[in-house]
Image (cartoon, grey):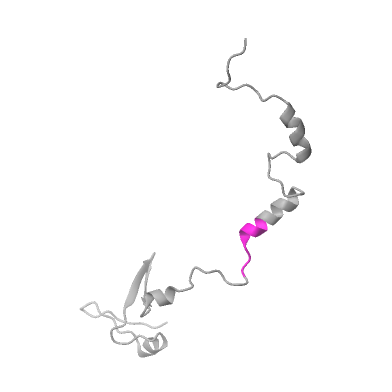
Amino acid sequence: MIKIRVSSKGQVVIPIEVRVHYNIDTGTELELREGPGYISLHPLPDNPVQAARGFLRPAQQSRSLLRELLRDKQSATGRGRLRGRPRRDQEDTASTEAPPPTLFDPVRN
């Protein structure tokens, strides 16, 4: 742990070994982050757009959680049919039966 002291002007001196390690030079902008019981300094990149490039892109070797869930769902249901969707052999019998009446059907006497 490195101790530093705050001057009467509110300034701190970052030790040389830390400045060299993080490539902090005169004019380097730092971000001050606060947390519960601590503060920290983080050097900002010279070109933030270039530094963020590829940040959201997944790694080439990453597995897709969605693909795994769909594969599990298909294996659990046999042929991968969605719940509530009739099979072909059930479609024929379902189409011959009359659907239940609704409020919008004409009244039959």
The magenta stretch is 62-69
- Count of number-bearing discs: 0
Give whichever of 81, 29 is nearer the camera: 81
Compared with 13, 61 (above or below) is: above
In the rendered image, residue 30, in percent from the top left (x then y), is placed at 33, 77
Q: Quadrant of the C terminus?
A: top right
Which residue is painted at 38% across and 75% down in the image? 48
- Is residue 64 covered in magenta? yes
What residue is drawn where x is 76% and y is 35%?
A: 90
Residue at 66% from the left image edge and 55% from the top image edge: 69
Residue 98 figure quarter: top right
Q: Quadrant of residue 97?
A: top right
Magenta span: helix, strand or loop, mainly? Answer: helix
**Farthest top residue?**
109
9 and 42: which is toward the camera: 42
In percent of width and height, residue 77 lies at 74, 47
Residue drawn at (76%, 31%), measured in percent from left and top? 93
Q: Nearer the viewer, residue 38 or 62?
A: 62
User: Residue 75 in magenta?
Assistant: no
Q: Name the image quarter holding the N terminus.
A: bottom left
On screen, residue 48 above or below 82: below
* Residue at the left extreme of this rendering: 9
Give the x, y percent position of residue 73.
70, 51
Task: Pick whichever, 65 or 4, lies toward us.
Answer: 65
Q: Is residue 68 above or below residue 82?
A: below
Whether residue 104 sits left or right of residue 42 in the image: it is right
Question: Residue 53 occupies which quadrant of the picture?
Answer: bottom left
